[in-house]
Image (spheres, rainbow, N blue to C red):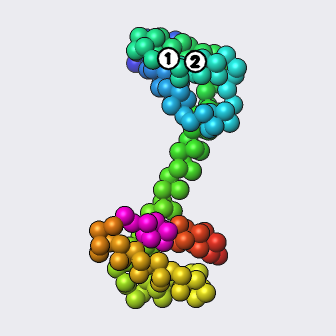
């Protein structure tokens, strides 16, 4: 067995270098795939920004591969951690939004199923002032569902529940 300090002096293996390169290329691809508004908010150097903007315009497969490699090379010259953190924060915000929407969908489904407990719990959360409008939307949504029509009232109910639940305390 060698001395652990000897291992620290050795350069990374060829396989490790390839793994790191592939990780940076994947990070670059994630940047290319980001919506323009979100990408503009990220802390990226100008040359990398230009390479990513150019990659979005490339349609040829071979040219896209070369550009991906070039973006990976540019990422080797900077600290990619702030970019990774920004992407992770974005992903977390997306997960929280999806969780909130699932909760709202569950409320809508419970109201459409006419669960008495759902109405009682909802009144405790949002107050009784909004119940008449919600009851009307629920009736319309049920009628649409029964007539196999487009679910416009169900969508309205979802939006109204989202507004009310986001304004609710706690």
Seen from the viewer's position, the closer of residues 136 and 162 is 136
Q: Is residue 29 above or below residue 136?
A: above
Say which mark, if any, is on residue 54.
2
Q: Residue at x 60, y 33 (%)?
A: 36
Does the segment drawn in magenta span residue 130? no
Q: Is residue 106 above or below residue 44?
A: below
For mark 1, give the secondary structure: loop
Is residue 72 at least partly visible in the picture? no
How dense is the environment of label 2, judged by Cα within 10 Å: few (below 14), some, or many (20 and up)? few
Does the segment drawn in magenta span residue 155? yes
For the residues labelled 2 and 1, say whether their Cβ atoms are less than 8 Å apart. yes
Q: Residue at x 54, y 34 (%)?
A: 34
Seen from the viewer's position, the closer of residues 6 and 14 is 14
Q: Predominant secondary structure in magenta?
A: helix
Q: In the drawing, does residue 51 fall left or right of residue 22?
A: right
- Residue that label 1 marks: 58
The picture places residue 69, in percent across and down from the top left corner, at: 49, 13
Q: Residue at x 51, y 14 (%)?
A: 67
For mark 2, give the secondary structure: helix
Q: Which residues are magenta?
A: 150-158
Alpha carbon distance from label 2 to label 1: 7 Å
The picture places residue 60, in percent across and down from the top left corner, at: 43, 13
Instruction: Choose top left, top right, bottom left or bottom right for residue 105.
Output: bottom left
């Amino acid at each position: 067995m060698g001395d652990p300090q000897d291992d620290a002096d050795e350069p990374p293996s060829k396989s490790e270098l390839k793994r790191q390169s592939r990780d940076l290329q994947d990070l670059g691809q994630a940047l290319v795939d980001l919506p323009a508004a979100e990408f503009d908010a990220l802390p990226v150097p100008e040359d990398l920004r230009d390479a990513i903007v150019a990659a979005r315009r490339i349609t040829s497969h071979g040219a896209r591969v070369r550009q991906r490699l070039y973006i990976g090379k540019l990422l080797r010259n900077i600290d990619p951690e702030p970019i990774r953190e920004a992407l992770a924060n974005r992903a977390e915000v997306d997960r929280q939004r999806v969780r909130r929407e699932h909760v709202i969908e569950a409320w809508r489904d419970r109201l459409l199923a006419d669960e008495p407990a759902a109405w009682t719990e909802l009144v405790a959360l949002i107050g009784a002032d909004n119940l008449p409008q919600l009851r009307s939307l629920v009736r319309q949504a049920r009628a649409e569902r029964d007539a196999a029509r487009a679910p416009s009232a169900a969508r309205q109910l979802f939006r109204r529940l989202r507004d009310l639940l986001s304004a609710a305390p706690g």
